[in-house]
Image (cartoon, grey):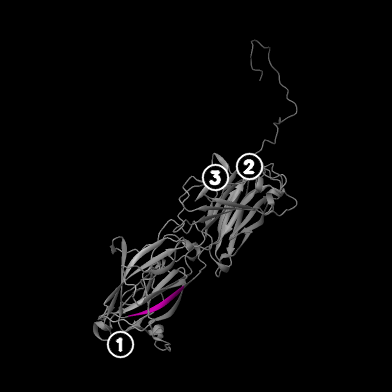
Amino acid sequence: MFSCLLLLLTVGITGLPEWILSTPAIVTFVIDENLPVGSEVGKISLDAITADQRDGPTAGTTFTLQDTSYFDFDPHQPNSLIVKSPLDRDTDRKLCSEGGWPEVCSWSGVIFSSDGRLLSLRIVVRDVNDNTPSWLTSQQHDGLAQLQISITENCPLGTAIDLPLASDPDVGSNSVVNYERVIQEAVDHRAPFDIICTKEPNGVRYKLVVRGKLDRETTPLYKLMIAAIDGGGNRGLAQLTVLIADENDNRPVFTHMKMKEIQSDLDEQQTEFTITIDEDLPVGSRLPRYPVATDDDEGDFGKITYSFAISVAEVVKRDFRIDEVTGAIFIRAPLDYDTGGLTHYQFVVVAQDHGIPPLTASCKVIIEVQDRNDNAPIITVTPTITATMTSLKSNEKHEKTSLQLLENAPSGSLIATITVHDPDSGENGKFTCQLGKIDSLRLEFLKNLGKLSVYQLYSTLPLDRESNPEVRVTLRCRDHGVPGRVSTELLMVNISDVNDNAPMFMNHRYSFQVRKITHFKAFLI
């Protein structure tokens, strides 16, 4: 099912019809993510759009959507908007083009009506809680995921150990929001452990906290039942086995903390390391900085292996990898800030020695991704007369666009609507557009719709095809980055012929002589 909300904003501008130049109406629909292809998103209500507008669109008005990648108008019901392509809310970042993902998935576009009106369209794709949390492990017993960790019997009270995260394809409040112990007769409810949860930028993280003394000789292992709970109350269960190991003399220590005053043993086990990188680092690049640990033991006991903590979110492991020998962090997937990539990653790296039992140190790693000016403004042209033209786009290159205007069209006629946006952020995403010097055309800024700027191209003089069949002008948009990136569009306005000339004789009078007509239908001249 879906619900919808329509909001109309109007600003009157004198000199041209109000329904053409008023501020665009903003039409918002809210739909569920699993809406099948062909389903109706909603209808564009002519009554609502024209409620405060005189001489507005009539019942014969038709609509065209500028970007039809995901949605389009039903050819059999011109005001009915339908789903054109599958809506993969959780993984398709182009669908969720506005900010706020993954909690909010919003798609925006522009609608043109056949009478010249401009509408702003926003579709919110709502997540459906149709998944139960589960642990992605091959170890299963009686339908329960089997998890295992090791801790030393001499670890101090309050020691916190990261636990494996459950997976839930849903997002936001429909994903995992809490973890807890489940007390059952089949498990040891006397185990000296608690579960604590913390909310972090990449999701909820949970740890096992030691609340009592551990004695390997008395109890070599504990079996606990844990539950992952999503926002809808769905629960996934797993059995956690905690192995109690003998002592190991020295644990690894991250070198960037050796010169700092350590407040407690818990502080020593987990420290923080921040890295700032640019979004355009290519896949396979090694990050310029990464945490490194050392171990004072000799031989194999002093060797260290690096890995992500078992609590690390899947999105981190998707975009980065760790060299287990050196600890170097490498990029696995494009970090494109402009297409909705994350700007902030937070995760834990574990350094583990080869002792028996192995000891570990943890380091919280924060990666900040900086935007780069790697996009030129993108220009999209939609003509008023669409019979002979397909809208073209440009990105850092010169494009040609053919437009059409009737030669008897009055001065001030709308030729095309032009939208421009730059995927970059901040100053890199701002831009200025200018039309080349020409007396017969003018470019007017209409409205900002989020990051989309809308312009309209008008004629300023009556145009005569017989004297000038085509008018050419270049639109140039430059962003405010340093150095700035430029896109240009060559607009070719073809003046369509109108039958505005009657036939004319070359002379006012013609004289000729003929012989005597000898038969019917004979040619005189």
Q: Is residue 231 left or right of residue 147?
A: right
Question: Residue shown at 36%/73% (left/top)?
Answer: 309
Residue 428 point in image, percent of width and height: 56, 67
Residue at 41% x, 81% y: name it: 271
Q: Confirm or deny contact between disc 1 and disc 2 (CB under 8 A).
A: no
Tell me the number on the disc at residue 73: 3
Q: Which of 468 and 185 is in front in this view?
A: 185
Q: Is mark 1 on a helix, strand or loop?
A: loop
> Within 10 Å of the Cα at label 3, are there few (<14), some (14-19), or many (20+) other Cα atoms?
many
The quadrant holding residue 194 is bottom left
Residue position marked by numbered label 2 in the rendering: 61
- Quarter of the picture containing the C terminus is top right
Instruction: Reply yes or no: does residue 406 show up in magenta.
Output: no
- Callout 1 amino acid: Asp
- Name the amino acid, label 2: Thr
Residue 107 visible somewhere in the drawing: yes
Residue 364 magenta: yes
**In the image: residue 199, left or right of residue 380:** left
Q: What stretch is highlighted in magenta?
A: 360-367
Q: In this view, does 140 lie above or below 438?
A: below
Q: How crowded is mark 1: few (under 14 residues within 10 Å), some or many (20 or more)?
A: few
In front here: 508 or 260?
260
Q: Is the magenta stretch mostly helix, strand or loop?
A: strand
Q: Which sits earlier in the primary sequence, circle 3 or circle 2?
A: 2
Q: Residue 296 carries which label?
A: 1
Tell me the CA gap for discs 3 and 2: 13 Å
- Image quarter for residue 455? bottom right
Q: Can residue 290 be seen in this view?
A: no
Cα separation, mark 1 vs mark 3, equals 69 Å
Q: Earlier in the sequence, mark 1 or mark 3?
A: 3
Q: Which mark is residue 10?
A: none
